[in-house]
Image (cartoon, rainbow, N blue to C red):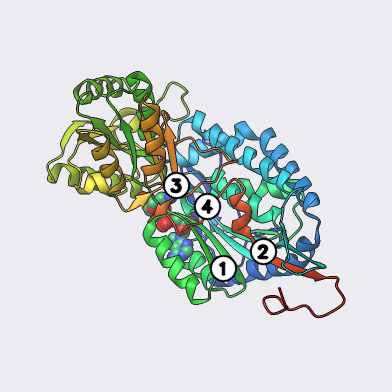
Amino acid sequence: MAAEPQKFGLFIGGKWVTPKGTQRFSTRNPATGEELASFVAGRPEDVTAAVSAAQKAFPEWRATPAPKRGEILLRAAAVLRERKEEVGRIVTREMGKVIAEGRGDVQEAIDFIEYMAGEGRRLAGETIPSELRSKFCLTVRQPKGVVACITPWNFPTAIPNWKIAAALICGNTIVFKPASNTAYCGAEVVKVYEAAGVPPGVLNFVTGSGAIVGNALVADPRVRAISFTGGVETGRDVYVRGAQQLKMVHLELGGKNPEIVMDDAELPLALEGVLFGAFGTSGQRCTATSRLILHEKIYDEFLKMLVERVDRFVVGDPMDPKVDMGPVASADQEKKILEYIAIGKKEGGRLVRGGTKLTGGPYEKGFFVAPTIFETKHGSRLSKEEIFGPVLSVIKVKDYAEAVRVANDVDYGLSSSIYTRDVNRAFRAMDELEAGITYINAPTIGAEVQLPFGGVKNTGNGGREAGSAAIDEFTELKTVFVDFSRRLQKAQIDPR
Ligand code: TXE
């Protein structure tokens, strides 16, 4: 018998609360339709209460020495490590990625929290020489205040932690709003910090729709910064509205990431790369490989190798370790992906494999789309727009120059990859591919928490998450001048 769905409240001021008269919504397993947990559909007044709690907690959290904040983060990492299997299973049940990836999602969260805990003993500013005598100049990092973390469903524990752990170590207080279809994972993240002893009000959690909770967070003038990961249109809207109040808005949006395979590439290696890059997480990663750019000399051979492997792909219950690919995350996702497949057919792409919703037997109650391969012409919608599903566009090119031109000719620039054994070409690609991330002889996915993450063009607005860049995202730099000359010294004016 299925377990009774859990009921979660909002987490405000250190307490789980269910405000009177609120409606509820549930999350469901995209593989089976099973109801998993139910949540409060937050209202604007709930957001106001959460921001008030965060604002109240801010002075004390700001005054807590950063290494002490780091100790709390280390405890959070330990709690999550202890619960890794359990939470990894919740990720898989709620979001649909295969269990190895569910565990990986949680591991990434653990890694990042630990990494940020260490930052508590750095949070480094700089000392910079003055042009004047007896004057000392330095920068210090200060928290921004109350920040909003608005997160998507595709990495439902990793992405919230990328934001929360970084914001916390820098001394900010937070209102966290998860994507509605992975609110259970979001609640588990909050429980981890609660268990680790984060003081009341420092981390608050409000579930509910983007249109209501998200909008209210963006509109509240007390929220000084917004860290957002999600779709381009939503991100643009958040940016524009945040700009009205001159808020810092950090955006991580989409991608249309290419894997280039040159004629001198190690083909079996490139094949493993594209399979993992295109169909891992059912293609629902912002760094997913959605374009395979093949040199004409190896085109037929590589496509044949790819098709042979995809024909052996096992799609099914993501909890089964033998399964290669699970469902897509929701009915909306399935609808959008199938619409793109229809567009691909209409614009004359050759459907090589897949292209259908999987039905019957184990697929009956879930949202399963077959791994799909299209031969496309560069310039078609399928080859240029983000699909966010297991749909790969294959594009033929005649040489390296055309490969790079095609790779760069899209609105996005998150990740990119090239397989080649020519070291000169590899270095050229590192320089010439327009993307925030370039992999050489590795797939477009594979972020590590100690390195910056983000992209160019419509992928964002210039910021980076993770790595030391995360500290830039969540701190203000204060410049300090200490004059110990005991007289008024005038920069630029005093005799030189
Ligand atoms: O994203 P949304 P969705 C892309 C992908 C996907 C598409 C739509 O192409 O198919 O976006 O996915 C909150 N003010 N990516 O609908 O709507 C929302 O509740 C403030 C790429 O899930 O952008 C959720 O918490 N917040 C991406 C978050 O924004 C609002 C990962 C993201 O939701 C809001 C996910 C509003 N007005 C989707 N409206 C990636 N880069 O990895 C919604 N939200």
Q: Position of residue 107 (x, y in %)?
A: 60, 35
Disc 4, SS = loop
Residue positioned 23% across, 33% down in the render: 399
Q: Position of residue 271 (x, y in %)?
A: 34, 24
Q: Hey, what amino acid is under mark 4? A: Arg
C-alpha gap between disc 2 and disc 3: 24 Å
Residue 325, visible in the rendered structure? no
Crowd band around label 1 with a 10 angstrom C-alpha radius: few (<14), some (14–19), many (20+)? few
**Residue that protrudes farthest toward the front in the picture:** 496
Disc 3, SS = loop
Residue wearing tag 1: 21
- Mark nearer the viewer, 1 or 4: 4
C-alpha gap between disc 2 and disc 4: 16 Å
Q: Hey, what amino acid is under mark 2? A: Leu
Residue wearing tag 3: 436
C-alpha gap between disc 2 and disc 1: 43 Å
Is disc 3 in contact with disc 4, using a CB cutoff of under 8 Å? Answer: yes
Q: Of the numbered discs in the image, which one, if any, rests on residue 477?
A: 2
Q: Nearer the viewer, residue 491 or 393?
A: 491
Image quadrant occupied by the C terminus? bottom right
Dot placed on the residue nearer the N-terminal end, 2 or 1: 1
Residue positioned 58% across, 40% down in the render: 449
Q: Of the numbered discs in the image, which one, if any, rests on residue 456?
A: none
Residue positioned 28% across, 32% down in the render: 370
Dot placed on the residue nearer the N-terminal end, 2 or 3: 3
Disc 2, SS = strand
Q: Nearer the viewer, residue 484 or 34?
A: 484
Q: Position of residue 179 (x, y in %)?
A: 49, 53
C-alpha gap between disc 3 and disc 4: 9 Å
Dot placed on the residue nearer the N-terminal end, 1 or 4: 1
Q: Of the numbered discs in the image, which one, if any, rests on residue 464?
A: 4
